[in-house]
Amino acid sequence: MVETFGIVYALEAADAMVKAADVDLLGYENTASGYISILVSGDVGAVQAAVEAGVSAVKEMGVDPHSSCVIPTPHPALSKITSQYALDKLLP
């Protein structure tokens, strides 16, 4: 995931992430006060490349991302949290 402040930066990060590697865009989370997390999944190498591309894209716009994270082997129960932010559930 990549977390940044503002929808413009989040969209730029998401665009760079899905273009950089073969990852699935899980969704997004508006965490608090304008911070938005973009979540992707895939094999570890692809997710690492996608996160690096997302961070780089945000930095190229002159802003540092709030945080970024790659979880190489997430526990299966974690899907209970991430599934609630799936695009098909968030969009009408």
Image (cartoon, helix red, strand yellow):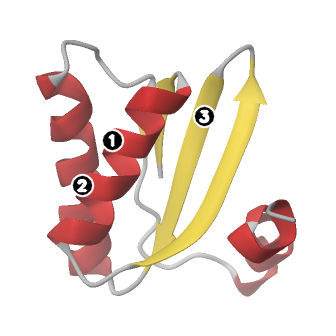
Could you give the CA–CA distance between mark 1 and mark 2, rounded to whole angstroms?
6 Å
Answer yes or no: do the residues labelled 1 and 2 have beta carbons within 8 Å? yes
- SS at mark 3 in the image: strand
Q: Which residue is drawn at 19% across and 38% down?
A: 57
Task: Where is residue 86? Give x, y as percent.
Answer: 73, 70
Q: Name the residue type under label 1.
A: Glu
Q: How crowded is mark 2: few (under 14 residues within 10 Å), some or many (20 or more)?
A: many
Task: Where is residue 55? Give x, y as percent.
Answer: 25, 39
Mark sitting earlier along the chain (1/3): 1
Answer yes or no: do the residues labelled 3 and 2 have beta carbons within 8 Å? no
Could you give the CA–CA distance between mark 3 and mark 2, rounded to whole angstroms?
15 Å
Q: Mark 2 sits on what residue?
A: 16
Which quarter of the figure has residue 60?
top left
Give the label on residue 36, or none: 3
Q: Which residue is drawn at 53% across and 22% down?
A: 6
Could you give the CA–CA distance between mark 1 and mark 3, rounded to whole angstroms?
12 Å
Q: Residue at x 54, y 59 (%)?
A: 39
